Image: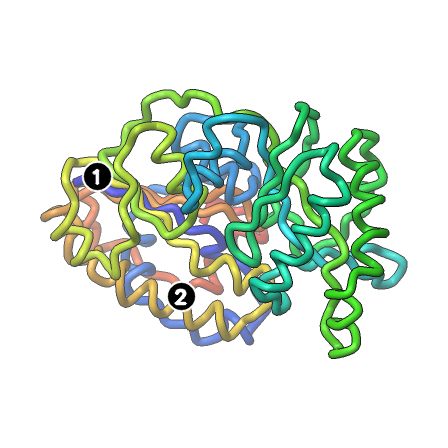
């Protein structure tokens, strides 16, 4: 088997962040990284790195993510965007975006807000709530609206991301924000001390297009965008296995893509302890078993990870397991070398 693991934020904090990196023992990954070849490319968002696994450089993430949802067949017609609920707040004269993973929003609140927005702005399109955190907008008429994926903006300053655009949807968002400001749901949330759902992040616009045939025998993931990409490319989309042993038992074919995004939410919400916990689980369930599988049931392992240090790739071939002279290094040392511009 040739296995590719796409794992966003494998290396996250600054090298001197001992709260996250200090004494973090990852024997499986450290063994594999020591024996692997390594490449480093320019930084990209997780969604972009995922699309590149399907030979896409310019993807319409909205309909592709929708295709991976329970109502996914709707994505095959019309013009769609992701329209995810967010909270905008001022901090030191900057606008900071918090996505719905950073605060509580329940299904009833989501459906109430979307229903009233649809009634008020029916001339623009129709919002569809799939989960409390993931909404979609089907436009009545196509409008180009370039915007970064939500994962690239969550917890960050918007700066010119809103005011710098002059598209009809940007102007419409100003009206949406005013509408949401006085909505009963937000009045109740503010009375309870909760962040208001005061805007939407529109991104991934476009119609669903045909995809080139990717090299994968199957794609394994719980991420709806990964599932949607697989379905659009007519590749089997499988639920995420619990670890390597389950994958080896179930996999058919020799080219498998597994998307493991457990490290992404802790990074978006600056949860060092959550990131460490998720990392230890990944090492136990995947990297330590991979150490034993290299050169046996596994011909090639490729680890792809979009990080603040760039798009990082480690590749291990079966014969590399015999490179005993290569010494394992802890993650904080690898992060230090990357921060200094070295190639790890």
Which element carries disc 2, helix, strand or loop?
helix
Q: Residue at x 83, y 63 (%)?
A: 91
Q: Residue at x 61, y 31 (%)?
A: 205
Q: Earlier in the sequence, mark 1 or mark 2?
A: 1
Is residue 342 shown left or right of residue 281? right
Q: Determine which of the numbered discs, if any, sits on residue 336 in the image.
A: none
Above or below: residue 332 compared with residue 82: below
Indicate the position of residue 99 as horizontal and vertical percent values: 64, 57
Which element carries disc 1, helix, strand or loop?
strand
* Front residue of this view, candidates 52 and 288: 52
Q: Quadrant of residue 107?
A: bottom right
Circle 1 residue = 2
* Front residue of this view, candidates 71 and 297: 71
Q: How is the image coloured?
A: rainbow
Above or below: residue 107 compared with residue 40: below
Q: Is residue 238 visible?
A: yes
Q: Determine which of the numbered discs, if any, sits on residue 279 in the image.
A: 2
Is residue 218 shown left or right of residue 77? left
Q: Residue at x 79, y 47 (%)?
A: 176
Q: Quadrant of the N terminus?
A: top left
Indicate the position of residue 78 as horizontal and vertical percent values: 55, 26
Indicate the position of residue 124 as horizontal and vertical percent values: 72, 33
The furthest residue to the right: 93
């Amino acid at each position: 088997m040739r296995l590719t693991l796409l794992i966003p934020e494998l290396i996250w904090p600054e090298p001197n962040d001992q709260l996250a990196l200090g004494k973090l023992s990852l024997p499986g990954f450290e063994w594999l990284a020591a024996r692997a070849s390594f490449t480093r490319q320019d930084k990209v968002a997780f969604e972009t790195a995922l699309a590149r696994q399907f030979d896409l450089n310019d993807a319409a993430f909205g309909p592709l993510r929708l295709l991976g949802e329970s109502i996914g067949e709707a994505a095959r017609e019309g013009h769609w965007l992701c329209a995810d609920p967010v909270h905008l707040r001022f901090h030191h004269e900057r606008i900071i975006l918090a996505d719905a993973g950073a605060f509580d929003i329940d299904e009833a609140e989501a459906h109430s807000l979307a229903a009233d927005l649809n009634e008020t702005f029916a001339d623009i399109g129709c919002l569809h709530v799939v989960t409390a955190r993931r909404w979609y907008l089907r436009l009545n008429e196509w409008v180009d609206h370039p915007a970064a994926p939500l994962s690239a903006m969550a917890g960050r300053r918007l700066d010119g991301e809103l005011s710098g655009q002059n598209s009809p949807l940007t102007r419409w968002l100003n009206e949406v924000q005013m509408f949401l400001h006085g909505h009963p749901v937000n009045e109740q949330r503010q009375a309870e001390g909760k962040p208001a759902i005061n805007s939407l992040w529109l991104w991934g616009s476009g119609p669903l297009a045909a995809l080139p045939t990717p090299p994968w025998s199957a794609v394994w993931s719980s991420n709806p965008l990964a599932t949607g990409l697989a379905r659009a490319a007519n590749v089997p989309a499988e639920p995420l296995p619990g670890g390597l042993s389950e994958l080896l038992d179930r996999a058919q074919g020799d080219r498998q893509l597994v998307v493991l995004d457990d490290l992404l939410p802790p990074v978006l919400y600056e949860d060092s302890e959550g990131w460490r916990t998720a990392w230890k689980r990944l090492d136990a369930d995947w990297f330590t078993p991979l150490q034993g599988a290299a050169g046996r049931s596994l011909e090639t392992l490729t680890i792809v990870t979009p990080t603040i240090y760039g798009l990082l790739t480690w590749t291990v071939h079966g014969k590399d397991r015999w490179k005993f002279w290569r010494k394992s290094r802890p993650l904080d040392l690898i992060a230090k070398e990357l921060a200094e511009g070295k190639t790890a």
